[in-house]
Amino acid sequence: MDTVGIVGAGQMGSGIAEVVAVAGLRAIVHEPELAPLRASEARVGASLAKAVDRGKLDPQDAAAAADRIVRTTRFDDLAECELVVEAVTEDRAVKCDVFRRLDERLAPEVVLASNTSSIPITTLAQATTRPGRVLGLHFFSPVPVMALVEIVPGYATSAEAVAAAEGLARQLGKHAIRSKDRAGFVVNLLLIPYLVGAIHLFDAGYATRENIDEAMTLGCGHPMGPLALCDFIGLDVIDGICACLYEEYGREEFAAPPLLRRMVAAGALGRKAGHGFYEYAPARRVALASR
């Protein structure tokens, strides 16, 4: 594979574009506006510079990778891609609209992949006329660091499309696992009840946010505690995944805790907002997270 498209230039889309370019492939990144593309360019540049500083990339290789990323506001520029990864917001209607547009403009043999963390792939595939060429390709944040990618075939996904996704994962140096097409796949089906449980503990006053996180980092060897992880992922993202899982399974361990919903409503979304369970911007305080 030579050219990969990415729809969405946020944190995940930028990370996917970076690993594609570092692997020697051309990445075409689409956003309808210039501002997110410029922010993505700065984000990738900073990440590549950090990789150079840490001795993981030569300066020449980093510069070459940066040059292999093309950013465009023209949706039709994705037509030359062999595989396109959708990495927009975790909203079913928004994603289905992207898949409809891709299906209309791209050749029928192009594989359409979603970076969704929870939405069933078969649902997204129904927005296209090529369900056999649609699958899930779920990367993990930060994409340049995390080795795993979940490959999720939909009900009608062909063996050829799965092979193409597995081949791309190998090209990118990722370890691929395969999951059935059920909401949450493997990682989030295990992770979300853990995060929900930690939020319930905090809300009930069992322990401080620091002690909850220390219990899991020092007691279980996790690199990050559950509340800090919620802030890293984004509380709005977790809330959306909870809704998708609860709709699919109807089990209480997947239901969004009331505290999570209140924090999302208040704009306390975690690191990207400057505050969540922890404060990242001292001038902006949220009472719910200061207990």
Image (tube, rainbow, N blue to C red):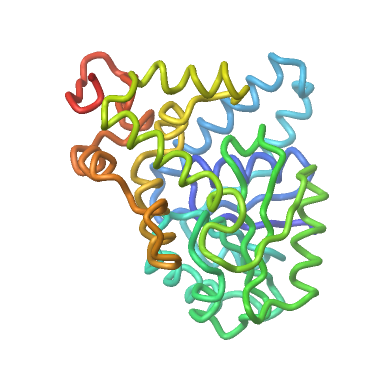
The relative height of residue 2 versus residue 155 in the rendered view (above or below) is: above
Front residue of 79/53: it is 53
Q: Position of residue 143 (x, y in %)?
A: 62, 39
Q: Position of residue 15 (x, y in %)?
A: 59, 40
User: Can you say which quadrant of the picture contains the C terminus?
Assistant: top left
Q: Residue at x 34, y 31 (%)?
A: 201
Front residue of 234/185: it is 185
- In the picture, measured across the screen, residue 219 lies left or right of residue 25, that is left
Q: Residue furthest bottom?
A: 129
Residue 167 sits in quarter = bottom right
Q: Position of residue 266 (x, y in %)?
A: 18, 38
The relative height of residue 232 versus residue 136 in the rendered view (above or below) is: above
Total marks shown come to 0
Q: Position of residue 254 (x, y in %)?
A: 41, 53
Residue 77 sits in quarter = bottom right
User: Can you say which quadrant of the picture contains the N terminus?
Assistant: bottom right
Front residue of 259/215: it is 215
Q: Residue at x 66, y 50 (%)?
A: 27
Front residue of 135/52: it is 135
- In the picture, measured across the screen, residue 3 lies left or right of residue 116, that is right
Q: Residue at x 42, y 71 (%)?
A: 97
